[in-house]
Amino acid sequence: MAWFKRVEKGIVTPTEHKKETPDGLWHKCPECKTVISTAEHRQQLFTCAKCNHHDRINSQEYFEVLFDGNEFEELDENLSSSDPLNFVDTKAYPDRIVATQRKTHLKDAVRTAHGKINGLDLVVACMDFNFIGGSMGSVVGEKISRAIDYARTHRIPFLMISKSGGARMMEAGYSLMQMAKTSAKLALLSEEAIPYISLLTDPTTGGVTASFAMLGDFNISEPGALIGFAGPRVIKETIGKDLPKGFQSAEFVLEHGFLDFIVHRKELKERLTNLITMLQAENQPKASARKTAAK
């Protein structure tokens, strides 16, 4: 029975000969617990092939998915938040901004860019949730507004990818003003018959939902995204009733008429291309009529 017993004692494997699995090689789906390699998960655009769960991704990944050859011109990339209120919680607001910038390698919670999607020009503003919860401060509102102005100037369709916990409390009223500011800019975009598509991703909540996220010519979403204003717990405590199953999910919001459709991330680029083509064709006569009237 020597097969099952260590005859020689004191056998030690040197550290350099030990084989361990490196971290980050595998991904477990948080919904169905299916395990696949990280490389395969990336090829699936960070979605689960078995249960369709969409992991949260950031602007870098969305730009890779959307822009042809991942080629784009970033707009206003160096804008950074100031501290208008001298706000301090567990740390001073400027210190929090600097620490978050170092951790995420981002300047703020939104990036804006211009590039081509299947050969069509498109301006994209994409929020990053890992920058203070994707909260909307002055820089977020300003960058989105400037991106809309760029789209108006060059007559290019505008796509907003929302992913946010809402307004940034460190900027208080300045943050809330961004709701009106961005909404007013989108009204100008609409007057000039330039398409605006709003993509709501997980989560889209608070003042973002109450402003630009719901003002698209088409409001679309990824499967399973949390979409709402206040959180389910706050609503339940306020109304004193149990909430319906799936409350504030993209599917629930679609059923109640607040979304136009839900799109899988793998189909996103093609569906956006079709939408842009359709909207441009529809709006062309309107734009021509406005130019004639102006003359």
Image: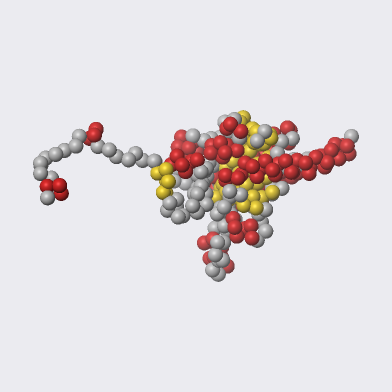
Horizontal and vertical percent for residue 270?
A: 64, 42
For this orientation, the residue located farthest to the left is 8
Q: Which residue is painted at 45% across and 55% down in the image?
A: 32
Horizontal and vertical percent for residue 246?
A: 55, 61
Placement of 45 over or under 209, stated as above or below: above
For this orientation, the residue located farthest to the bottom is 241
What is the quadrant of residue 189 in the picture? top right
Horizontal and vertical percent for residue 31?
A: 46, 55
- Mark yes or no: residue 217 visible: yes
In front: 109, or 70?
Answer: 70
- Mark yes or no: residue 182 visible: no
Left or right side of 291 for 230:
left
Q: Quadrant of the C terminus?
A: top right
Q: Which residue is painted at 58% across and 31% down in the image?
A: 69
What is the quadrant of residue 193 in the picture? top right
Rendering colour mode: secondary structure
Q: Which residue is painted at 41% across and 49% down in the image?
A: 35
In front: 30, or 168?
Answer: 30
What is the quadrant of residue 11 in the picture? top left
Number of labels in the image equals 0
In front: 138, or 293?
Answer: 293
Horizontal and vertical percent for residue 21?
A: 32, 40
Placement of 243 over or under 13, stated as above or below: below
